[in-house]
Amino acid sequence: MTILEIAVYAALLGGASPVTCHLDEAAVARCSNGLDAEQISRREIHFSNGVTVHREGDAFPAFSNGLKAWWGSSGWLQFSNGIGIRRLGPSEYAFSNGLVCGTELPDLIDCVRQRSSAAP
């Protein structure tokens, strides 16, 4: 998984609030919402709050805290916490509440609220 995907999951776990994540020298993603994430394998991330996210290929991410995902009728990836996410391009994701996560630098991701949302 990429630092962008890790930041998206950190934002999702933090209630889809604005967050900035950066990858440090020890390859730990440190996010401004207090979550740190360590990539255990290419398919698994462990967050400092105890949640593990596992993803196999194109399958939905599996969250150890029970958070579920499915494709919504509008094409957004919907989560059981009420948040929807969709990819805007290779370096940007949009949340249904107006949050957008984008790559600022190769090791820095910024998730900020946009003025309007194309939410489902």
Image (cartoon, rainbow, N blue to C red):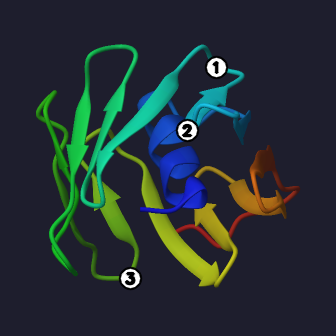
The answer to which of 36 and 96 lies nearer the viewer is 36
Mark 3 crowd level (few <14, some 14–19, many ≥20, 10 Å Cα): few
Q: Residue at x 55, y 38 (%)?
A: 11
- Are there few (<14), some (14-19), or many (20+) residues within 10 Å of tag 1? some
SS of the residue under disc 3: loop
Q: Which amino acid is tagged 1?
A: Asn
The answer to which of marks 1 and 3 sits earlier in the sequence is 1
Q: Which residue is drawn at 40% across and 74% down?
A: 76
Tell me the residue that label 3 is attached to.
74
Between the C-alphas of marks 3 and 2, the distance is 21 Å
Mark 2, secondary structure of its residue: helix
71 sits left or right of 97 in the view: left
**Labelled pair 2, 1 in contact (Cβ < 8 Å):** yes
Residue highlighted by disc 1:
33
Horizontal side of residue 1 vs 60, given as left or right: right
Quarter of the image for residue 102 reads bottom right
Taking the view exactly as shown, the residue that stands out farthest to the front is 26
Q: What whole-number distance in Å separates the C-alpha atoms at marks 2 and 1?
A: 8 Å
Question: Mark number for residue 11?
Answer: 2
